[in-house]
Amino acid sequence: MDAVEVAKDVKRADLLQMYYYLRLTRTLEDRITALYRQGRIMGGVYTSSGMEAISVGYASALRPDDIIAPFHRDMGAFLVRGITPGEVVAQYLGKRTGPTRGKDGNVHFGDLKRGIIAFVSHLADNLPVATGVALAFTLRGESRVVVTNTGDGGTSRGDFHEALNFASVRKLPVVFFCNNNQYAYSTPLSLQMAIPNVVDRAKAYAMPGEIVDGNDLAAVYLAARRAIDRARAGEGPTFIECKTMRMHGHSEHDSAKYVPRELFEEWKKKDPILKAEHMLKELGYADETTFKEVEERVKKEVEAGVEFAEQSPLPEGTETLEGVFAAEDEVQS
Amino acid sequence: MDAVEVAKDVKRADLLQMYYYLRLTRTLEDRITALYRQGRIMGGVYTSSGMEAISVGYASALRPDDIIAPFHRDMGAFLVRGITPGEVVAQYLGKRTGPTRGKDGNVHFGDLKRGIIAFVSHLADNLPVATGVALAFTLRGESRVVVTNTGDGGTSRGDFHEALNFASVRKLPVVFFCNNNQYAYSTPLSLQMAIPNVVDRAKAYAMPGEIVDGNDLAAVYLAARRAIDRARAGEGPTFIECKTMRMHGHSEHDSAKYVPRELFEEWKKKDPILKAEHMLKELGYADETTFKEVEERVKKEVEAGVEFAEQSPLPEGTETLEGVFAAEDEVQS
Amino acid sequence: MTTTSVEHEVTYLEAISEALDEEMARDERVFLMGEDIGPYGGAFRITEGFQKKYGEWRVLDTPLSESGFVGAAIGAAMMGMRPVVEMQFADFISCAFDQITEVAAKNHYRWGAAVPMVIRAPFGGGVHGGPFHSECPEGWFFHSPGLKLVAPSTPYDAKGLLKAAIRDNNPVIYFEHKFLYRRVKAILPTEDYIVPIGKADVKRAGRDISVITYAAMVHQALEAAEQLTKEGIELEVVDLRTLVPLDKETIYDSVRKTSKAIVLHEDNKTGGIGAEIAALLAEECFDCLDGPIHRIAAPDTPVPFSTPLEEFFLPKVNDVVAAARKLAAY
Amino acid sequence: MTTTSVEHEVTYLEAISEALDEEMARDERVFLMGEDIGPYGGAFRITEGFQKKYGEWRVLDTPLSESGFVGAAIGAAMMGMRPVVEMQFADFISCAFDQITEVAAKNHYRWGAAVPMVIRAPFGGGVHGGPFHSECPEGWFFHSPGLKLVAPSTPYDAKGLLKAAIRDNNPVIYFEHKFLYRRVKAILPTEDYIVPIGKADVKRAGRDISVITYAAMVHQALEAAEQLTKEGIELEVVDLRTLVPLDKETIYDSVRKTSKAIVLHEDNKTGGIGAEIAALLAEECFDCLDGPIHRIAAPDTPVPFSTPLEEFFLPKVNDVVAAARKLAAY
Ligand SMILES: Cc1ncc(C[n+]2csc(CCOP(=O)(O)OP(=O)(O)O)c2C)c(N)n1
Ligand SMILES: Cc1ncc(C[n+]2csc(CCOP(=O)(O)OP(=O)(O)O)c2C)c(N)n1
Ligand SMILES: [Mg+2]
Ligand SMILES: [Mg+2]
C-alpha cells in the first residue's frame, strides 16, 4: 500500500505531533553536531539523522505508563517521552542539570519517571533488561508494554539471542525494534549476518516479525501499534525490522568513506522528514506554512535548551563519589 | 525412507565398526556408572545412554586430521577418535594417566594429537572455539573440517548465536550437531525455546539445517557425511538436529522424576543399539553371534581399562602448581 | 520446605531455603529465577517445593542463559520487583559477567535507578567439582564498584544475610559455600531477623593473632584456633560476612588489639580479597603491626579435580596453625 | 603504516601499529580479528592499510560479537595460529569475559593445549569517554590465573611488548592506554626487538621513595619526580610493564633500597593491582619498610563523564607529590 494510504489509519493530530517530534529531533541533533564541531562537546556524538521516524514512531505508539529501552539512535523517543532539549544538551555538556548529573555522557541516560531505561554502551545489553521489564508487568498482571531497539549490528550479540528467546518462551509484552541502517560502524550487513533481512532472526524464536520502511513515520507508528497491541493482549513479543540508512558517519568523527556515495544519494531522497511532509500535504493535514511554523517552534525550543544547558552548572568534583549505591530509604519509581 | 534402506548407503565394514563403538560406549559408561554407585568416582557422571549413535555417527564420518569439539554426552566420539577406555576411567578416577593428569574430571578432556578439543562446562562455549578451528583451516587453505555438538539447552546461550552467525557469515568448514534429548537437566524443551524444532534456530543464519533420527546410527552418519562434505567443499556450515532422548537423569544423582514414565517407555523401544542390530541383521551384515562377540570384546576392553585406571597412580599434590602457563618452547600440535 | 514457627536446627542449606521462603511470603515483589529451580527444586534442592507454593511465575525456570536472565532480573528490579537469581554453580556467573558489572553495578551511579536484586552463587571447592564447579569468583566482583557482596559461614548468617540482601536496594551477590550446605547446622531464632550487610563478626575472640577470613575458611580458622589454644596462642577469628562494603573498623579494631594478622581465603591468592585487606592494614595499621601480614590462600591455578591436587590446593587448618606459630614467635 | 627501515620517531599508537605489521610480515600464523579493523582501520586507526596489505582474511572484520570472536581466536590459536584480537574499547571485554577466563585461561592447565593469542584492549580514561569508554579492566584479569597481562607506558615498550605477546605461547591481554596513543613519542631502534614479558623497568632511579606504577600513570609519576627533585626528594619510578607475571624482584629491590613505597594506578582502588603489590610488600619487605605503604588510585566508582568529575576521579601528579612529601617526612 502506498505510504499516504497507510497514513490514513493514523489520526491527524497524532501525525502532526509526530511530525513536530521529527523536526525537533533533527534540529536538536543538528545543533548538537554544530556544538561538537565548535569543540564545545566532550565525548562522542551519535545521531539518528535520517532515521528519526523510527524512534518517534514507536515512542508515539505507547501509553504514558509503558516503558522504552532505547539505543543510541533513538533521540526521537527520548523527546516524545518528555525529555526536554535543555536536558539533552545539558547531558551532552556534562552539566549537573542533565539527567545523569554529569555522570554519563550523550544518549546514555534514562528516567524512570518518564518510563525510560538508560542505554548501555555494550550493545544489546538492554534487550535482556527489557525482557525483565516485561516480566515485571506480567508478574504483576499489569497491561503495560516495553519497547526496545537495537541496531543491525547489535543483533549479532549473544544477549540479543538470549533476550528474544526468553521473551518468546514466556510470551512477554515486549516489542523488539531493529534499526537496520545497513552498517554497524563501518561493517556492512553482509559481514554482519548471512541472512538478507534482519527479521529472519525472529524465526529462531517463533516470533512474529515484520519489515517496515523505517523512513515512513506512519508505517513505523502503525507497525509499533500493532505489535504493542499484541503484546498488551498477552500474545507475546514481536520483532520489527525498520529498513533505513545512517546518513552520516558512525559518529561525528567518522567521514563514512566506506559507504558508497550513491547509497547516500539514494537514501537522501527517502528522508523521513521529506516523506512525512509529502504525506501530510497529500492528506491535506498540513502545508508549507505549518512546516515553517514547526520549524520555527523547534528552533526556538532547541535554542532555549542550549541556553539552559550552557547556563547550567557543572557538577563539583566531589560529586564523583556520590551515588554508587542506592540509599536504603530510596523510593523506587 | 526406512532405516534399513538408508543404511545401504553405508559400507558394511563402517557399519560394523560403528556398531562396535556403540557397544563400547554403552558398556564403558555403564561400567563408570557402576563405579560411581560404588562410590569409587569423584564428581559427576554424565552419560550418553540412549544417545550413543549421535557421537559415534558423526565421529565416524570424519577424516583423521579433522577435529571434534564434543560436549558432555559424546563419549562415542572420544572412543572413535582413539581415546581408550583405560584413559577414560583414569580420567574419572582423577589418575595421572588420564588425559588431564587429574587436573579436570569426567568428560572434560581433549587431546590435540587425536583431534579433540576438550569440553568446557560452560555450555556452548566450545561453539565459538569450533568456529576458530574452522577459521584456522580456511586461513591456511586446508580442507579439514570441525564438528561440534551441543544439547538443546546449550542452544539458548549467547555463544551459540555468536558462533553460528560467524560461521555462516564466513562460510566456515564447521558442522554443528545438536543432541536434542528433549530436556536440559530438568527443563523441558517447551521452557527452553518457543520453536517446535531446534533446527529452526538455523534459519537465523541462513544455515542449512536437517533433522535426523538421533537413534539411527546410519542416518546420523550419513547426515554427518553430507554436512562434512559440504563443509570440506567450502560450502559452509550445517546444523543437524538429532532427535533423541536422555534415558536417565541428568547425571547419576538425578532420578529424573520430572520425565513422564511413558516417554522413557516409548524411547526404550527406539534404543540405538536395538535399532542398529535390527538394521545389521536385516542387511545380513551380522547376526546374534556377531553381537555376542562384540559384547565380549568390549567387556574385556572395558575391564582392562578399569584395571589400568585403578592401577594407575594419582598425581602428587605439588602437581597442582604445574601447567598454568605453556612453556616458551612448547611445541603445538 | 520448613516454616520457622518453632526453634529448630537447620543446615546452612536449609537456612538459605528458609530465608527465601520467608521473604517470598513477606513480600510479593520477591520472585526467583534460574535453571531447574521449579519442579526440580534447583541443583541443590534449595527451592524444593517452592513452585507448588508460589506458582510457576514466581519460581521461574529460565532457558539456559545466564546473561539473559540476569539481564531480565535487572529490568524487573528497576520496575520495583525483587528478583533473586540462582546460578546453578557460581562458576557460570562468568556468562553473566557483562550484565552484572556493566549494567547492574553501574546503573544507580549513572542515572539513579536502583537495581534491588540478589544473585545467589553456590561457590567454592572441596566437593570434587574440578575447575568448573568449584570456583571462587568473588575476587572479580570485589573489584567492581556498585555491587554488594556477602559470603556467610553459618546457618544464622546465611539466613540473616540473605534476608538483608533481598531487602537491600542494590545488586547483591550472595556467595553460598557448597561445602557448608549440609556440613554446618545451628538452631535459629524463631522470629524474623536479618544480619546487616556491612558488619563483620568476631567468631572467636583472642588476644594474639587476628585471622581475617570468610565463608568455609572460617571453620578452618576456628579449628586452628582450637588447636593453638593448647599451645597458649589465642587466635581471634574475624568473619567478614560482608565483602563489600567491607567492615574496616572491625578488622582494624581486631588488629590493633592483636598487632598481628593472618588473612585467609579459599580464592586464589594474587589479587584476591586478602590482598586488599593486607594493603589496608599496611596503610592504616602500619604502626600497630608487630609482624608481617600473612596471607593464606589457594595458589594461582584453576581448582584441580583429583583429590590429592584439590587437597593441596585448598588452604588447610595446618597452614593456619603453621603461620600462626611463626607469627607468634616473630 | 610505516616500516622500520630507518630510525624514526613514532607515537605510542604508531608503535603498536608497527609491531602488528612487522609480526604479520614475519610470521604467517599471525592474523587480526575485530570490529571495523579492515577497510576502516579500527576505531583508532591502528590497522589502517593493513587489509590492503594482508588481505581480507588476515585482517578480519567480525560481526559485533566479542564472545564469539574471542572464542574463535582461542580455537584458531589451538590450531597453531597466532590471532591478535582487538576490542574496540577495553570496556567491551566484559562481553568476552567468560571465553577469556573459563576457556582461554584454564585451557593449558586443564589439558595441556596452549592458546597463543593476544587481546588488544584500548583502556583508560582522560579522554572524556564516560563509564563505558574509559574503563581499566586489568584488575579482573589480574585475578584470573592463566592469563598474562601487559600494559606499556612508552612507544618503545608498546612495540616490544606487543611483539613479545604475539610470540608468547599463552593468552596475553595487551592493555594499551588510549590517553597515550598520540601523546607520547619516541625514536625506536631500527632492528627487531622485544621487551620481555615479566620484566619491570625502572623508568627513573631515585633513593627516597619507590613509586610502583604502570601505563599512563608512569607519566604522572615521572612528572611528580621532576617536581620533587627540586625539594630534594628523589622518587624511583618502577614501571611494571607486565602485570602478570609480576616482576616481584624489581619491586622488592627498589623498596629495599628506598624503604618507602607508593603504589599508583588509574584503576579503582579496592581490589586493584595496587592492593596485591602493597600486600606483597607487607609480607615480603616488612622489615625494610620505613613507613606505611601508600596507595594512590581512582576511587571506587565507575569512570564519570563530566570534566570536573573525571578530573577528580583520575589520580593526579599532585596526589603523588603530596603522598611523597608525607612519606618523606615520616
Ligand atoms: C558490545 C559492543 N561492542 C562494540 C561496541 C562499539 N560500537 C558502538 S556502536 C557500534 C556499531 C553499532 O552498529 P549497529 O548495532 O548496527 O547500530 P548503528 O550504530 O548502526 O545504529 C559499535 C561496534 C559497543 N558499543 N558494544
Ligand atoms: C552456562 C552453563 N549454565 C549452566 C550449566 C549447568 N548445566 C550443566 S548441563 C545442563 C543442562 C544441559 O542441557 P542440554 O544442553 O540440553 O544438554 P543435555 O545434558 O540435555 O545433553 C545445565 C543447566 C552449565 N554447564 N553451563
Ligand atoms: Mg547499524
Ligand atoms: Mg538436552
Image: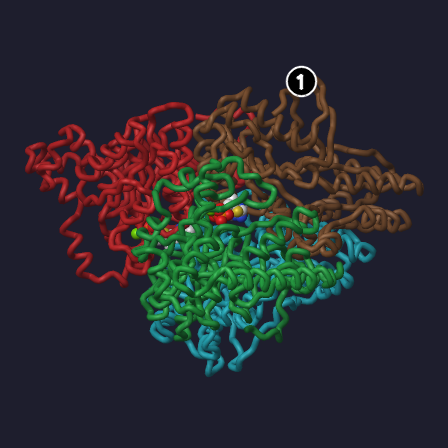
Chain colours: A green, B red, C cyan, D brown
Q: Is residue D22 left or right of residue C86?
A: right
Drawn side of residue A126 relative to residue C209, left or right: left
Q: Quadrant of residue A309?
A: bottom right
**Residue pictured at 37% horizontal, 62% vertical:** A7
Q: Front-most of B280 and C157? A: B280
**Residue corresponding to mark 1:** D191
Q: Is residue B214 visible?
A: yes
Identify the amino acid type marked 1.
Answer: Glu
What is the x, y in percent for residue A12? 42, 68
Q: Secondary structure at mark 1?
A: loop
In the image, residue D23 above or below residue B118: above
Quadrant of the image containing the C terminus of chain B: top left
In percent of width and height, residue D52 lies at 51, 25
Q: Looking at the image, which residue is at 66% across and 67% down?
A: C202
Q: Label 1: chain?
A: D
Say left or right for B228 vs A308: left
Task: Where is residue B209? Give x, y as percent.
Answer: 26, 42
Pick whichever, B221 or B269, lies toward us.
Answer: B221
Query: How many residues crowd around disc 1 within 10 Å: few (fewer than 14), some, or many (20 or more)?
Result: few
Labels in figure, total: 1
The answer to whether residue D108 is above or below residue B188 is above
Along the line of sight, the residue nearer the viewer: D258 or C51: C51
Side of C168 relative to B293 (left or right): right
Classify mark 1 as within 8 Å of ligand 1 or not, answering yes or no: no
Residue at the right extreme, as displayed: D231
Report the quarter where the N terminus of chain B lies. Answer: top left
* C34 to D105, vertically: above or below: below
Question: Looking at the image, can residue D85 be seen?
Answer: no
Q: Nearer the viewer, residue D281 or B290?
A: D281
